[in-house]
Image: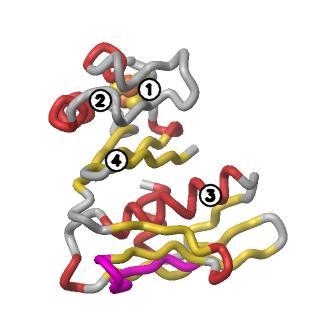
């Protein structure tokens, strides 16, 4: 399961397949990570610096995070994609094809001016989460989506 939690400044990624349940996150920031709650991550529960520090201590890599750099990510179901915006300018997208019960992610691209900011990962995670919520199989075929979802 892939989930993304955003506030104005940072995005938390959680990949349940990697989670070893050592619960270091719960011990590090109990007001953010609480497995008795749904959703179990409350990104508003502590200052960003505390969340960032706690995530660095996740032993499995199930939790990761990035700064948002003012970039907004939206799901565009009509066009089968997630889209990144810098203000009104579209600066990236991730596209999928729906077949039977699957979403095949076949293209991820971010403007070179915005590379290295975690935007592509946010685009891929958004599609994975939306697909999983709709009980669709996610099939990554573009190399970046494979790296994010399979590594
Ligand atoms: S610290 Fe990482 S591996 Fe441990 S429970 Fe939290 S997310 Fe899972």
Return the mark for residue 20: 1
Q: Residues within 10 Å of mark 3 (few under 14, many from 20)?
A: some
Return the mark for residue 59: 2
> Which residue is found at the position 48% from the left and 56% from the top?
150
Q: Is residue 92 magenta?
A: yes
Q: Secondary structure at mark 4?
A: loop
> Which residue is found at the position 33% from the left and 86% from the top?
89
Extent of the magenta region? 86-95
Question: Which residue is identified by label 4?
Answer: 7
Q: Which comes before the other along the chain, label 4 or label 2?
A: 4
Is the CB of the residue bearing disc 1 within 8 angstroms of ligand 1?
Answer: yes
Q: Which comes before the other along the chain, label 2 or label 3?
A: 2
> Which residue is found at the position 35% from the left and 19% from the top?
31
Is the CB of the residue bearing disc 2 within 8 angstroms of ligand 1?
Answer: yes
Q: Secondary structure at mark 1?
A: loop
Q: Is residue 88 magenta?
A: yes
Q: CA distance from mark 1 to mark 3?
A: 24 Å
Please state the horizontal and vertical placement of residue 85, each as a whole percent of the image.
36, 76
Q: CA distance from mark 2 to mark 1?
A: 8 Å
Q: Residues within 10 Å of mark 4 (few under 14, many from 20)?
A: few
Q: Nearer the viewer, mark 4 or mark 2?
A: 4
Question: Seen in the image, is 91 located left or right of residue 77?
Answer: left
Is 121 above or below relative to 113?
A: above
* Mark 3 and mark 4 residues within 8 Å of each other at the beta carbon: no
Question: Seen in the image, is 137 located left or right of residue 42?
Answer: right
Is 21 above or below relative to 147?
A: above
Question: Which residue is identified by label 3?
Answer: 130
- Quadrant of picture, ligand 1: top left
């Amino acid at each position: 399961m892939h989930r993304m939690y955003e506030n104005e400044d940072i995005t938390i990624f959680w990949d349940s397949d990697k989670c070893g349940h050592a619960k270091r996150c719960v011990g590090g920031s109990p007001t953010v990570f609480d497995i008795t709650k749904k959703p179990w991550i409350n990104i508003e529960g502590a200052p960003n610096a505390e969340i960032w520090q706690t995530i660095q201590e996740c032993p499995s890599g199930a939790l990761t995070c990035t700064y948002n750099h003012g970039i907004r990510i939206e799901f565009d179901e009509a066009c089968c994609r997630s889209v990144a915006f810098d203000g009104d300018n579209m600066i990236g997208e991730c596209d999928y094809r729906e077949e039977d019960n699957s979403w095949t992610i076949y293209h991820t691209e971010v403007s070179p001016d915005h590379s290295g900011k975690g935007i592509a990962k946010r685009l891929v995670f958004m599609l994975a989460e939306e697909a999983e919520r709709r009980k669709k199989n996610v099939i990554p075929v573009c190399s970046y989506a494979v790296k994010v979802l399979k590594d």
